[in-house]
C-alpha cells in the first residue's frame, strides 16, 4: 500500500494537506531523479556539512566495555548533529518547489538550528516551533536559531515539548500550505515524510558501512542508535537491513524507568495509534489519548515514533530497548572522559546500551553535547 | 439525515462533548436540541487536535480534564438524539482505540446518524467507514480549498450523509470574514454530489450565513458556539440569532 511500512504509516491528515502532500511527493520524486539536484546535494554535503563524517575507533571505551566499539561521528556535522542532512535536502527541495517560507518543529533544538542554518544560507524565511519547556532546557540552541535569523515561536500547549511543537507546526502548515514548506525533523509524519527523511539520512549508514568494511574488513555485529522519532537510527539502519548477520538495535528514552510511567519509549511500551499523520507505535492511554512523556533528552521526548521503526519492530528485523536518564548521563560522562568526545544526551542512550554488548559494535553518535551542559548540573 | 427546510440554509451547531463538564455539556446540548437546527455536532475530545484552533483545543483539554471519554460522549448523544440529528466529530485515534466496530455499534445504539473524521481522508478510511456503514452510520468526509479536482470527486463519492466543505485554508476558529470565492467553491462541490453540502470553519456571524445561502445547504458553527459555553452562556441565544438570520 502506498506510503506504508507493513500496516504502519499512511496519511492521517486534514484534507487541506492531502493535495499538498501529493505535490510534495511528486516534487521529491522528480528531484531524486534529477542529476543536477544530486550534484548540488553532494557539493553542499562535502563543503557545507563536512561529509563524509569520520568513522572513529573508540579505543578506550572499547577497553572499558570489553568490546570493539566504533562511532559514526555525526556530531562533527556542521551545526553539531545529523539533523542537517535532512534539512539540507528539504531546503533544496523547498527552493525547487518555489516555497520561500520554511517552518519546522524542534525538541532539542538541533533540527531547529539545522533548519535555521539552511534558511540563512539560502535566504529563506524561517519559523521554528519549540515547546516552552524545551526552550528552557536547550536555551543555547534558541539563541543560535535567533542569531541565524529564525523566529522561534514558543508553544505552551500540553507538556510544552516536541509533540506539542509538532502539532503547532502542522497547524501552521494547514494554514499557510500554499506558500510554506514544512521541514519535519524526524522520520515521522504523513507519507512521504518518513520515506523522504530516511532517504536523506541514509547517507549516515551508506558511509558508515563502507568505512567499516574498509577499516575492519568485515561488518559489525551490532549497529546501535537512539530513537526518538528515529531519523538517525533509520538513517544508519537502512544500509544494513540486508545484512542478516548485523543486529540492529534502537534505544529509546527510558526516562525514570518504564515502570514509573515517566518515559518516552513508544516501541518498548506503547501500542499502535495515529499521531501527526501516521499509524505507528504510540504512548497512549486506554481511551486513545496521547500520554505525556518524560526524558532528560529533549530530542527523544516524543510519544510517537517513525512508522518504519514500528515495521522493523514487528518484523523483528530490529530490536528496541530503553535506557534511563541516569544511564544516559553516565554514558555521556564516560565517553567524554575516556574519548575526549562530548556526545549529546540523545546518543548517550545508545552508548549506554553499546556498553552492555559483546563483539563489534557500531554506534551512531548522532550529535554533540554542548547544548546539554546546563542540564548536567541538574542530573 | 439532516433536518433541512426547502430553500433555507440550515445551521449545525458544534459542542465539545464534556465541556466544560458533563452536566453543563448536557445542559448546552439539550438547549440546542430544542431549536430547529439541521443537526447537532458533538466533538469527541482528543489530546492532539491538528485541525482545531485555540477555542476548540482548550475546550477539548477541559473536557479531557473533566474525565470525558468516548463512553461519556455516547451517553451525551443518547440524551438528545431523539430530538435532533446527532453527528460526532472525532479524530481517528480515539475511535481506533475504542475499536471501530464497537464504536459503530454503540454510536448506532445512542441514536447518532454519522461521524465526521477531520484527520481521515477517504484513502485511509476503509476499516472505519466500513464498520460505520455496517451499522447504518454515515461517514462524512471533508473537502478543503486546496483539494484538487479529482479529490473533490473522490470525497463526494466516498461521503455519506453530507459532504463537509471546509471554507478556508486553515484550522477551526471564528473569523471576521469568510474568504472570497467561498460560494464558487461550494458550487463546485455541489455540482459533484446529490448529498447536502455543509460549510464549516470560521463561520460565526449572520452576514457569513447570508454569503453562504444559495451555495451551501447548511453551515456548521463551532468555535463561536463553544466560546459561548466557555463563557458560561447558554449557546441557544447565539444559535437562535443565527437561525433568525437564515429566515
Image (cartoon, coloured by chain):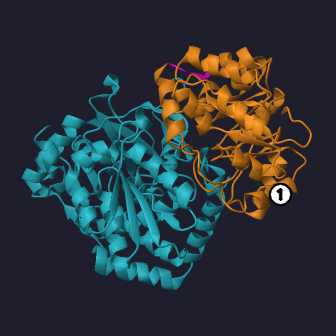
Chain colours: A cyan, B orange
Looking at the picture, tell me which residue is in the foreground, B8 or B140.
Answer: B8
Q: Main secondary structure of the magenta part?
A: loop
Q: Residues within 10 Å of mark 1 (few under 14, many from 20)?
A: some
Q: Is residue A144 above or below residue A269?
A: below
Q: Is residue B38 above or below residue A302?
A: above
Looking at the picture, tell me which residue is in the foreground, A145 or A323.
Answer: A145
- Label 1 resides on the chain identified as B
Choose top left, top right, bottom left or bottom right for residue A301.
top left
Residue drawn 28% across and 62% down? A145
Is residue B195 toward the left or the right of residue A365 in the image? right
Residue A256 spot, x, y in % from top left: 26, 29
Residue span colored magenta? B67-71
Residue A170 spot, x, y in % from top left: 50, 52
Describe the element under mark 1 as helix, strand or loop. helix
In magenta segment, residue A201 = no
| Residue A324 seen in render | yes
According to the picture, the residue beneath numbered tag 1 turns out to be B187
Quadrant location, the C terminus of chain A: top left
Looking at the picture, tell me which residue is in the foreground, B11 or B18.
Answer: B11
Residue A196 spot, x, y in % from top left: 51, 63
Residue A134 spot, x, y in % from top left: 28, 46
Residue drawn 52% across and 31% down? B59
Amino acid at each position: 500500500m502506498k506510503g506504508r511500512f507493513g500496516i504502519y504509516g499512511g496519511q492521517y491528515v486534514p484534507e487541506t494537506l492531502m493535495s499538498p502532500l501529493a505535490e510534495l511527493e511528486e516534487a521529491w520524486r522528480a528531484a531524486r531523479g534529477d542529476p543536477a539536484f544530486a550534484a548540488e546535494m553532494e557539493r553542499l554535503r562535502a563543503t557545507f556539512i563536512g561529509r563524509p563524517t569520520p568513522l572513529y575507533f573508540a579505543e578506550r571505551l572499547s577497553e572499558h566495555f570489553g568490546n570493539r566499539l566504533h562511532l559514526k561521528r555525526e556530531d562533527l556535522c556542521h551545526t553539531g548533529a545529523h539533523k542537517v542532512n535532512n534539512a539540507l535536502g528539504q531546503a533544496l527541495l523547498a527552493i525547487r518547489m518555489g516555497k520561500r517560507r520554511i517552518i519546522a518543529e524542534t525538541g532539542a533544538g538541533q533540527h531547529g538550528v539545522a533548519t535555521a542554518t539552511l534558511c540563512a544560507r539560502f535566504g529563506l524565511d524561517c519559523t521554528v516551533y519549540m515547546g516552552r519547556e524545551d526552550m528552557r532546557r536547550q536555551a543555547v540552541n534558541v539563541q543560535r536559531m535567533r542569531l541565524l535569523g529564525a523566529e522561534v515561536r514558543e508553544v505552551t500547549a500540553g507538556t510544552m515539548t516536541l509533540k506539542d511543537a509538532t502539532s503547532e507546526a502542522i497547524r501552521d502548515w494547514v494554514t499557510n500550505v500554499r506558500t510554506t514548506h514544512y521541514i519535519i525533523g524526524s522520520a515521522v509524519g504523513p507519507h512521504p515524510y518518513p520515506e523522504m527523511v530516511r532517504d536523506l539520512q541514509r547517507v549516515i549508514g551508506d558511509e558508515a558501512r563502507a568505512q567499516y568494511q574498509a577499516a575492519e574488513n568485515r561488518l559489525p555485529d551490532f549497529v546501535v542508535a537512539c530513537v526518538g522519532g528515529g531519523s538517525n537510527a533509520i538513517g544508519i539502519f537502512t544500509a544494513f537491513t540486508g545484512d542478516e548477520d548485523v543486529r540492529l538495535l534502537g534505544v529509546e528514552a527510558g526516562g525514570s524507568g518504564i515502570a514509573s510511567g515517566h518515559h518516552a519509549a513508544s516501541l518498548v511500551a506503547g501500542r499502535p495509534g495515529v499521531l501527526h499523520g501516521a499509524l505507528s507505535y504510540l504512548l497512549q492511554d486506554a481511551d486513545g489519548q496521547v500520554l505525556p512523556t518524560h526524558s532528560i533528552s529533549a530530542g527523544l521526548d516524543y510519544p510517537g515514533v517513525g512508522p518504519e521503526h514500528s515495521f522493523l519492530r514487528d518484523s523483528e528485523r530490529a530490536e528496541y530497548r530503553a535506557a534511563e536518564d541516569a544511564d544516559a548521563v553516565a554514558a555521556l560522562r564516560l565517553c567524554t572522559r575516556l574519548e575526549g568526545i562530548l556526545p549529546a544526551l540523545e546518543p548517550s542512550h545508545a552508548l549506554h546500551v553499546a556498553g552492555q554488548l559483546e563483539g563489534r559494535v557500531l554506534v551512531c553518535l548522532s550529535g554533540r553535547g554542548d547544548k546539554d551542559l546546563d542540564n548536567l548540573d541538574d542530573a | 439525515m439532516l433536518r433541512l427546510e426547502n430553500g433555507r440554509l440550515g445551521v449545525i451547531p458544534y459542542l465539545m462533548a464534556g465541556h466544560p463538564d458533563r452536566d453543563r455539556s448536557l445542559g448546552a446540548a439539550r438547549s440546542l436540541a430544542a431549536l430547529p437546527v439541521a443537526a447537532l455536532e458533538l466533538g469527541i475530545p482528543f489530546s492532539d487536535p491538528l485541525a482545531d484552533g485555540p477555542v476548540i483545543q482548550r475546550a477539548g483539554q477541559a473536557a479531557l480534564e473533566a474525565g470525558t471519554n468516548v463512553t461519556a460522549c455516547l451517553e451525551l448523544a443518547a440524551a438528545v438524539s431523539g430530538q435532533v440529528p446527532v453527528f460526532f466529530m472525532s479524530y481517528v485515534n480515539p475511535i481506533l482505540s475504542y475499536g471501530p466496530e464497537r464504536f459503530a455499534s454503540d454510536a448506532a445504539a445512542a441514536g447518532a446518524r454519522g461521524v465526521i473524521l477531520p484527520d481521515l481522508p477517504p484513502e485511509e478510511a476503509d476499516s472505519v467507514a466500513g464498520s460505520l456503514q455496517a451499522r447504518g452510520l454515515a461517514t462524512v468526509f471533508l473537502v478543503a480549498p486546496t483539494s484538487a479536482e479529482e479529490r473533490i470527486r473522490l470525497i463526494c463519492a466516498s461521503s455519506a450523509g453530507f459532504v463537509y466543505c471546509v471554507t478556508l485554508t486553515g484550522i477551526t476558529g471564528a473569523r471576521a470574514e469568510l474568504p472570497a470565492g467561498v460560494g464558487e467553491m461550494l458550487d463546485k462541490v455541489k455540482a459533484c454530489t446529490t448529498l447536502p453540502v455543509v460549510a464549516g470553519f470560521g463561520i460565526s456571524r449572520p452576514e457569513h450565513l447570508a454569503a453562504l445561502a444559495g451555495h451551501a445547504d447548511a453551515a456548521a458553527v463551532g468555535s463561536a458556539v463553544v466560546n459561548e459555553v466557555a463563557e458560561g452562556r447558554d449557546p441557544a441565544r447565539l444559535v437562535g440569532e443565527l437561525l433568525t438570520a437564515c429566515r
